[in-house]
Image: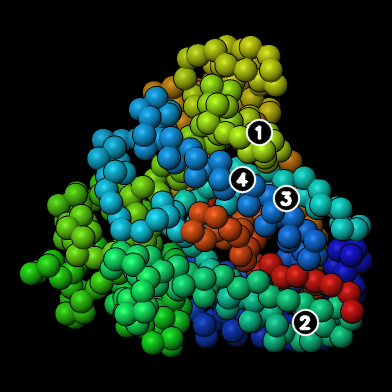
Amino acid sequence: MNLTKAIEHYHSLLTPDIAAESQAQMEEIQHKGGMFFGTRPLCSVLRPRFLSTAQYHFLQQALATMMPAFNKATHAALHHDAIRQQLRLVDWEEKLIHFDHGYAAASPLGRMDEFYMPNMQDDSLGSLAMTEYNAEVPAAPAYNALLTEMFSLMPIMREFEKTYEVRPLHARHHTLNVLQDCYNQWLGGSNASNLAAKPRIGILDWKEVPTYSEFVMFRDFFIQHGYECEICDPREVTYENGKLLTPSGFHITLIYKRVLWSEWVERGGLDQPSIQAVLDRNVCVVNPPRCKLMHKKASFAVLSDEQNAHLFSAAELRAIHSYIPWTRVVEERRTQVMGKDIDLVPYISANKDQLVLKPNDDYGGKGVILGWTVDQSTWDGMLQDYLKEPAIVQHRVPVPSEPYPSYADGKLYVIDRMLDTDPYLFYGTHMSGCLTRLSTAALLNVTSGGGSTVPTVIVEER
């Protein structure tokens, strides 16, 4: 499979008429479907992300070999203070991670953020670097589903599919299946009677967040499949007689948590109605507090650090060395880089062009410093700041780029855009579906003002 050939063929089909018609249809569908991140349309380009079957299976296999290591690290952190201290938890996290949330997985819904550089000329699998694990509240499975459907009906895709087979990668239904499975376990098992018990779902987050439009998509999807559901703000729910209620009186039995645990606790405390209902085991919550262990960016330091090698099997260590960039918690210490002993802080200062600094628990690219984009004094200043608050340092990884077409002012533009590869994870074990984000800026993140979200599809020549 030659992806370059497929991309070039796709672009060759974008005649002025087809490009204009496809752009108009894309704008209309996004407007009618509420497909916006805040006020920005989700997608601004005219091509999905292409992968071959072999490349998609490579991503699945890579995660299948990596996730046991993350799960071992979770277990070790729960049972060993020395491991848990490396994650730099705050006080309320230390308290809640031991809460029995009622089902097996610590992070039943997740997403791994990666940079994948396949060989575009054939099915050679290329290189892969996993840089962050969104173990808490992965966004965009519903966005991805609607974007996939949008592209499948565009004039350009109608022409392209005469030569190439295009297979979508869905993740939205897996989200619902996970919610139902977790609820079954929370009720006390997965026997036949429990399988018939559908949760009453509350999608919980602040009503002003830019991803609110996706909550509406999920609510409609859940209702379409026979589940009662409301979108609710943590500030507006009440807890009465063991029932968590929305302002309309809707009784929530399962929280599909889209609010971040840190914001949820810090804004309202542990005694607010929604959290108290969770702690009283009167409502099921997905994902649980324990997801914070691997959601911390320091989880990559736990896996990468030579002092923790004894936790993992030989196969897991090979996977860690293959897919996890060198990562350490920012602190005064001695450690190793490629087997060589170093003093960490001077090493960070002296090698800024090959390093990235990240706060331990933030999102949307906040606080991320790409060393090669700042001067030495700025870098050293941030290093000193991050010695005072939990943060990690990570080796720079190659960022892939591909040409993507866009249409504006009556003209077609094909511009190289950087992209990441963000597979969805379910039950903390396996991958299905994939988010792709594009940007012309070095920091690929929609929240931080990145360019576009596109669906990922499998492409094979007919």
Contact, mark 4 vs mark 3 (Cβ under 8 Å): no
Residue bearing the label numbered 1: 314
Query: In the picture shown, does residue 184 fall above or below 160?
Result: above
Name the N-terminal-most of marks 4 and 1: 4
- Give the residue drawn at x 77%, y 82%: 157
* Total marks in image: 4
In percent of width and height, residue 213 lies at: 44, 73
Name the image colouring: rainbow
Question: Residue 42's quadrant in the figure?
Answer: bottom right
Question: Residue 20's quadrant in the figure?
Answer: bottom right
Question: Residue 379's quadrant in the figure?
Answer: top right
Q: Residues within 10 Å of mark 3 (few under 14, many from 20)?
A: many
Residue bearing the label numbered 4: 66
The answer to whether residue 140 is left or right of residue 224 is right
Residue bearing the label numbered 2: 157
Name the N-terminal-most of marks 1 and 2: 2
Q: Is residue 249 visible?
A: yes
Contact, mark 1 vs mark 2 (Cβ under 8 Å): no
Residue bearing the label numbered 3: 116
Q: Residues within 10 Å of mark 4 (few under 14, many from 20)?
A: many
Q: Residues within 10 Å of mark 2 (few under 14, many from 20)?
A: many
